[in-house]
Image (cartoon, helix red, strand yellow):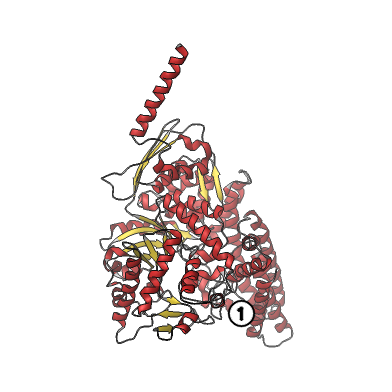
Amino acid sequence: MKRVNLKIKKAVSLFVLLFFCALNGYSRNDEKTKSAFAVIERLIGSRANEFELNIVKDKNQDKDWFEVEATKNLVKIKASNNTALCYAAYNFLRDIGAVLISWEGNRINLPKSWPTYSKKQNTPFEYREYLNACTFGYTTPWWDWKRWEQEIDWMAMHGINLPTAMEGQEAAWQELWKEYGLTNSQLEAHFAGPAFLPWQRMGNINSLEGPLPQEWFVKKEELQKKILERMRALDMHPVVPAFSGYVPKAFAEKHPEAKITELKSWSGGGFESTFLLDSKDPLFKKIGKRFIEIYIKKYGKSNFYLADSFNEIEPPVSEANKYEELSNYGSAVYETINEAAPGATWVMQGWLFGDNKEFWTKEATSAFLSKVPNDKVMVQDYANDRYKVWDNQEAFYGKQWTYGYVHNYGGSNPVYGDLNFYKNELTSLLKNPHRGNIVGYGAMPEGLNNNSIVYEYIYDLPWTKGEQPINDWLTKYLNARYGQTTSKSVFQAWELLLESVYNVKYWETRWWNDRAGAYLLFKRPTASITEFKGNPGDKKKLKEALDILTNEAKKYDKKNFIQYDLIDATRHYYSLCIDEDLMECVKAYQQKDIAKGDDLFKKIEKQVLNIDTIMSGQPLNSLDQWVKSASDYGSSPEVSSLYVKNAKTLITLWGGEGHLNDYASRSWKGMYKGFYWPRWKMFLEALKKSVVNNVPFDENKERESIKNWEINWTKSK
C-alpha cells in the first residue's frame, strides 16, 4: 500500500512540475517551439532534450532577440520566434567550442555537461536576408529535399528569416500559360533548361538549353511545398515569385492587339529575344493576379513577392514620358500583387540601380517607386561590396530596403572576403542618420559552398552590431571549427589570411578585359594576358599563412576542418602562381625564348595536376559530384543527359555569343585537369608552333578552335 501511495505521490509531483513548467512557458514539447527543437535535434541528437525553449513576446523588443542561460544539465533559451531560438542555440554551442556547422560539414563534440553561460542579444534588423535569384541556377538545381532540409537548418542556425524561395514556380507558369491557350509544344519551345531558369524568370532569356522535361515541373512542385512548409514553421518569411511583365513569344504572337515590346538580346547578344507586356495593357494585371492565384492554390499564401521587370535590361520607355511610364510600371507591379495577395509586400532586387547607373538616375528611380506605399515595397540592396546604391539613391526615398552583399558571383570560388570591411560598413550604417527605412541585412550570394567564414561572420553582425573585436570573434570561431584551444601558430596563420585574402571585398579581376573567369587559368586563353596587372590580395602573406597551416595541420586528425582550410589556401595560392607563370610563358614564346617557354609550360602543367590531386580532399567541390547530381536528378537516360549538358554548359560556355563564358568558373577537382589546362595547353602549343615555324600566330582561329572543343566537352559523357 505504501508503494502505491509513493507512486501516486510521484505521479502527482510530476504532474505539478509539468503544470508549473507549462504555466511558465518552459515545456520542451511546446507546440510553438517544436520546429526549432527539431532543428537542434537534427544537429545534436538526444542532447536536444537538455534544451528548454520558450517563445516570449517582449513588449520592450520590437525586433528579434534571445536570451541563453546554461547550467550543468540544462540550457534555457528564450527568444522572439523559432528562428531566433535556433540562432541562440547555435550561438551558444559555437561559443563553447562544441559545434561548427558549414557547407563542408559539421563538427560536433559536445561536453558531458554544459558550462555556466549567460548571454542576451537583439538585432536592429527585422529581417536577415539570404539567397540570390541566381543561386537557383548556379548551386541548387539538382538539390533534393534532404539537401534543402540541411540548408534550411543552416539558415535557421544563422538567424536567417527572409530567404528567397524560387523553386517550383514553373508548374504555376505552365498552368497559367495553358489557360491562355498555349500548347505543350509552344511551352516546350519557351522554357529554358533547368540550370538557366533564373535568367528566364528575370526576363533575360528564353528557351536556352531546353526543353524543360515534364518531370521537372512535378519534382520541383513537390519540393517547393516542403521547402515553404519548413520555412514557415520556423517563422521565416519566404520571398516567392510574382509577375513582372514577361510573356512567352507564342503568347505575343497570339495577342497581336496587346502592347508587347520585343527586347534586345541580353548581355552582349546571342540569346533569343524576350517579350515584355506594357504595364498599362489590361492583360498585365489580369495575368499577374491569375499567376498569384495559381501559386497560392499550390503553395499557400505569402507575405513577400519578388518581381524584377528590368534586371540588366533598360526599360522600354519613351524619352518624352520616361518618368511617367516608369511610375506606371512600378504601380502596376505593386497593385497586381496587392490585389491578388492583399497586404503583401513587393520585393525587388536593387542590383539594376547599380548595374546601370546611367539610366537609373535619382529621378528615374524615385519615379519608378513613387506610386507604391512606403511599407509595401522592399528594395534588396545587396551589392554593397561593389556599389553604394542606397547612398546614391537617398536610401530609396522612404521605402523599405535591406542592406547586404553578393560576395559570390556565379559560384566561382577564389578565396576572398573582407571581414573588416563588413564590420566597418555595418557600424557606419547604424550611425548614419540618412539610412532611411532600413529593415534588413544579409548576404545574397549567387553561389554557395565556398568561403564559409564570410557567411559565418556576416550573419553574426546583425546581432553583435559590429561591436565585437574581430580577433575575439575569430578565436571562438577557430576553437569551434578545429575543436581545441587554438594555438598561437594557427591563430597567426589566420591573422595572415585576414591580411592576405580576407581583405578583398570583391574579386575584380574575374572581369579582366571583359573576360570572365576567376583566375587567368580559368579564362578562355588569349595572348593579351601579358598585360594583366595581377590578382587582388597579398600573395606573400598568403604563402606565410600556408606554410604555417601546412605545419600545424600535421597535428590534427585528417578529418579536421584545418585540412579543408589548408586545401583552400593551397589551391588559391598555386592558382595565383599559375597565373603569373602563364603570363611569363606566353611572353617567353612571343619573344622566341623557346627553352624558357617550355620550362614554364612543364611547371604550369605540374602545378595544375597537383592542384587537381589535392582537391580530392574536397569531394563535394568536384566536377564529378556536380555532374553526378545532375544525372541522378533525371529519371531516364534522355532526361539525365539533358541535365548533365545543362550542368556542364553553365559552368563553362554559359550560352550566347556574349562575354558570359567562364562566368561560373569553378576551382574544383576535375576542372583544372579536365577543362582549364587542356584549353591553355592547346593555345600554348599553337603559339609555340607559330614561333618555331616562323609564321604569324592566328589567335582568333585558335580561340575559335578552343570554343569548338568546349562545345564538344559540354556534350561529352
Q: Considering the numbered disc 1 on the image, is that residue within a helix, a strand or a loop?
A: helix
Q: Quadrant of residue 515?
A: bottom right
Residue 696: percent from left, percent from top = 67, 88
Quarter of the image for the C terminus: give it. Answer: bottom right
Specify whether residue 473 is in view: yes
User: What residue is shown at x 62% (from left), y 46% (from top)?
Assistant: 559
Q: Quadrant of residue 527?
A: bottom right
Q: Residue 453, how many percent across, how many down?
A: 49, 53
Residue 271 against residue 399 in the figure, above or below: below
Q: Residue furthest top?
A: 1
Q: Quadrant of residue 77?
A: top left
> Which amino acid is tagged 1?
Ala
As displayed, is residue 448 above or below residue 588? Answer: above
Q: Which residue is mark 1?
A: 527
Q: Residues within 10 Å of mark 1 (few under 14, many from 20)?
A: some
Residue for point 50% across, 36% down: 47
Q: Nearer the viewer, residue 154 or 697?
A: 154
Q: Position of residue 252 (x, y in %)?
A: 46, 82
Residue 27 or residue 667, whichever sits in front: 27
Q: Between residues 300 and 125, which one lies in front from this camera angle?
A: 300
